[in-house]
Each structure stands twice: as structure tokens, then as C-alpha cells.
């Protein structure tokens, strides 16, 4: 069993190292976790002893195969709880993340599998992110950021990467949700903002916002 702090560390490291599995510096981990560098170093050493991470001097830290599975199991619990909070308790999608952050650390025997079955084996959380499988394997959504679409292209929203309350409330204001069809009408050369069509209405999305919206052509 891992502590809450350990689970948060490996989950953050999984996100930081991305699909390439690149090494992440202790300074970057400290920034992402709002911790002192010395505290991150101590946590890195502790998890290294448990064979969950590998640290290389001057390169940083990365998850071992065992650590990657452990991180994905925590992410699995988090996303299943998000589905439960929305579908069974009626919470809006912008409110489920902070609650799931607490519930994800409840790890009783077969809890994730029972919750998965109770919910009808959902494939994605309320924000469209794929729910890892029971064996700790990740699912590839085969999606790209809206920022990669060219003028004249259209696509369907499949996930929102930024699941903060503020960003999702902004999505609500723009009438952007999972399965929303978005067409790129124009790309502004000055800052690469996109003029898009959503339900017949034109809106302007900044590059930072477009990067957080995952779509499938």
C-alpha cells in the first residue's frame, strides 16, 4: 500500500513524463507538486527503494514499469469516481475533479473493479479522458489538440485536458462539451488564435485554450 503523498507523486510524474517516458528533473517535480526540492528528493529516494521510480544523476527521475502500473491504477480510481459523482450523484463535470482527488486514495480490495462494474464499465471520465484498464494499461484516445487543426477542418471534441473548475466553467460558457462539433474557420497569423464555429456561432479560441481541447477528425 502506498501513502497518499506517494500516490500523488507517481501520478504527477506519470503526467510530467508524457507518452515518451522522458526523465523529469526534481525541480520540475517540485514545481508541479508545490513542494520544496528537498522534500521531492526524499520522496524520490523512498520510491526508488520501492522500485517505483528510477533516478539518474543529471537526468532526473522516471517511472519504472511497476511504478507506471501503480500510477495508472490511481488514475483509474480517480476517473471512475468522477463518473460516479456525475452519473450517480448528479455533480456537474466542473465539480467532480477535486472530490475525486480525495476519493482516489480509498483503495479497498476489489474496490475499483466493483465500482467499474456498478457504473457499467465506462470507457471515459466526464472530461473524455480514457479510464485505464484493470491491469493498469492505458488506452490511447487517438486524438489530437484542437490547436493542430488547420483552417477548413472540423472535428469532434473527445476530451478536455484541463479539468480545473475554472477551465470547465469557461467551456460551459462557450458551449463546448464532449461530442461538440467544432469547425476551424480561420487562424489568426498574429497569435495563432482560431476563429471557430460552434453550433452556428463563431468564437475565438486562444492557442492556450485550443491546446487543452482534444478532438478527433
Image (cartoon, helix red, strand yellow):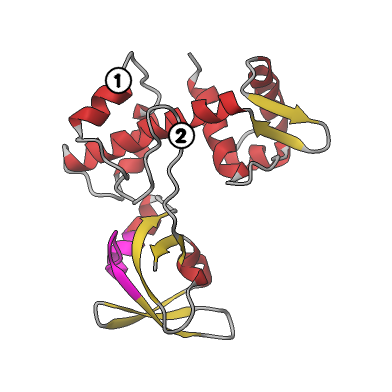
Q: Is residue 176 magenta?
A: yes
Density class for disc 2 (Cα within 10 Å; few <14, some 14-19, many ≥20) is: some
Q: Position of residue 38 (x, y in %)?
A: 72, 27
Instruction: Determine whether the residue tagged by mark 1 lies in a helix, strand or loop.
Output: helix
Which residue does the image show at 58% across and 46% down from the upper left?
19
Q: Is residue 187 magenta?
A: no
Residue 117, compared with residue 158, is above or below; it is above
Question: Label for residue 111?
Answer: 1
Which residue does the image show at 30% across and 71% down from the upper left?
181
| In this rendering, position of residue 33 left or right of residue 36 | left
| In this rendering, position of residue 25 left or right of residue 101 | right
17 and 191: which one is in front?
17
Q: Position of residue 11 (x, y in %)?
A: 52, 34
Density class for disc 1 (Cα within 10 Å; few <14, some 14-19, many ≥20) is: few
How far is the residue under mark 1 from the one under mark 2? 17 Å
Question: Label for residue 137?
Answer: 2
Q: Quadrant of residue 202?
A: bottom left
- Say whether disc 1 or disc 2 marks the residue closer to the N-terminus: 1
Q: What span is colored magenta in the figure?
A: 169-182
201 and 39: which one is in front?
201
Which residue does the image show at 42% across and 27% down from the upper left?
135
Q: Position of residue 29 (x, y in %)?
A: 65, 38
Quadrant where the C terminus sits is bottom left
Amino acid at each position: 500500500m502506498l501513502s497518499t503523498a506517494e500516490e500523488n507523486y507517481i501520478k504527477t510524474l506519470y503526467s510530467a513524463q508524457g507518452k515518451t517516458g522522458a526523465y523529469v528533473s526534481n525541480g520540475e517535480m517540485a514545481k508541479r507538486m508545490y513542494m520544496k526540492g528537498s522534500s521531492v528528493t526524499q520522496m524520490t529516494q523512498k520510491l526508488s527503494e520501492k522500485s517505483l521510480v528510477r533516478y539518474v544523476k543529471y537526468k532526473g527521475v522516471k517511472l519504472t514499469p511497476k511504478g507506471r502500473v501503480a500510477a495508472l491504477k490511481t488514475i483509474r480510481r480517480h476517473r471512475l469516481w468522477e463518473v460516479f459523482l456525475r452519473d450517480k450523484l448528479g455533480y456537474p463535470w466542473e465539480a467532480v475533479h477535486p472530490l475525486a482527488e480525495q476519493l482516489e486514495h480509498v483503495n479497498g480490495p476489489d474496490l475499483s473493479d466493483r465500482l467499474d462494474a456498478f457504473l457499467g464499465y465506462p470507457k471515459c471520465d466526464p472530461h473524455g479522458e480514457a479510464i485505464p484498464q484493470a491491469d493498469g494499461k492505458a488506452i490511447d484516445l487517438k486524438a489530437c489538440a484542437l490547436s493542430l487543426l488547420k483552417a477548413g477542418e472540423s472535428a469532434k471534441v473527445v476530451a478536455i485536458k484541463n479539468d480545473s473548475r475554472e477551465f470547465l466553467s469557461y467551456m460551459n460558457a462557450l458551449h463546448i462539451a464532449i461530442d461538440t462539433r467544432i469547425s476551424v474557420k480561420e487562424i489568426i497569423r498574429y497569435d495563432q488564435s482560431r476563429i471557430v464555429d460552434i453550433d452556428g456561432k463563431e468564437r475565438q479560441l486562444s492557442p492556450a485554450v485550443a491546446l487543452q481541447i482534444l478532438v478527433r477528425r
